[in-house]
Amino acid sequence: MSARKTEDAPTTATSGALPRHVAIIMDGNGRWAKKRFMPRVMGHKAGVETVRTMVRHCAEKKIEVLTLFAFSSENWRRPEKEVRLLLELFVSALKREVKRLNENNVVLKIVGDRSAFPEALQQEIATAEATTSANTGLKLVIAANYGGRWDIVQATRALADEVTTGRLESSQIDEAALDRHLSLYGMPEPDLFIRTGGEERVSNFLLWQLAYCEMYFTETLWPDFDGDAFDDALNSFSKRQRRFGRTGDQVEQEKNA
Ligand code: IPE
Ligand code: IPE
Ligand code: MG
């Protein structure tokens, strides 16, 4: 059997370790508000506070990347008013938070199809990214109008363009070639996926990148997710044995070598 696959696979069994990259589906804002007889948007507003808390925790723990799913390519299907309020909230949060993120050495990156956003929001995104691009601390990735399928399709299109223009042979297309065009290129793969709000599905988040990610689901609604809840997720992660296709014994042997 060829050894290629094992050489290509990640080799770190991070049992006991912290994840380098945490990816979160921030779900449950609407239900949080409904329980309090408040409009859904109040849940989204409370959710922004949780984002601030999580950024602080990740920075303190020296986690390298935090990716947050803020708006999916399917969320346009929501009532027009909720979509509008979500976009407004996004703009105001960007404006308000960029200074603080910059002071905290955070690099902000927005992934997703931003061409569908109003011009003012696109401008705000570009400014926020430029302001923080030279920082060296936590990378905060916000997935907005993002879909895992969209990401793979746009990467495929970029590869097709390279082949059409003669910069690439179709025989050179491999996983690394596709990966180069994906939104999270250059970042470590997500190690820990967290979904709050009780649903146990991926909802078109990072499809390609979740291949060997550890999954963690919690009933806690996003506005209630706090440092202790995050520590529970990290604790669960630290106890797992990541095998990447090998046997448990092999992983143990390598750890002790
Ligand atoms: C997640 O909370 C935030 C977004 C999708 C923008 P929801 O708004 O989906 O909250 P629930 O699932 O209805 O409670
Ligand atoms: C996923 O949540 C998207 C975000 C959190 C941004 P949804 O609430 O939209 O997911 P579904 O529709 O319940 O799968
Ligand atoms: Mg939801």
Image (cartoon, helix red, strand yellow):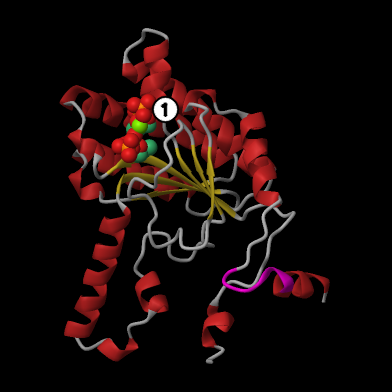
27 or 182: nearer the eye?
Answer: 27
Task: Name the residue beneath numbered marker 1.
Answer: 28
Furthest toward the top, the residue is 37
Residue found at x 66% / y 68%: 12
Q: Amino acid at mark 1?
A: Gly
Secondary structure character of the magenta stretch overall: loop
Furthest toward the right, the residue is 256
128 or 184: nearer the eye?
Answer: 184
Residue 180 drawn above or below residue 102: below
Q: Secondary structure at mark 1?
A: loop
Q: Quarter holding the C terminus? A: bottom right
User: Is label 1's Cβ within 8 Å of ligand 1?
Assistant: yes
Task: Give percent across and percent down for residue 117.
Answer: 21, 41
Task: Give percent across and percent down for residue 54.
Answer: 57, 35
Residue found at x 78% / y 74%: 253
Residue found at x 68% / y 41%: 60
Task: Give percent across and percent down for residue 165.
Answer: 18, 84
Residue 213 drawn above or below residue 176: above
Q: Which residues are magenta?
A: 244-249
Is residue 44 visible in the rendered image? The answer is no
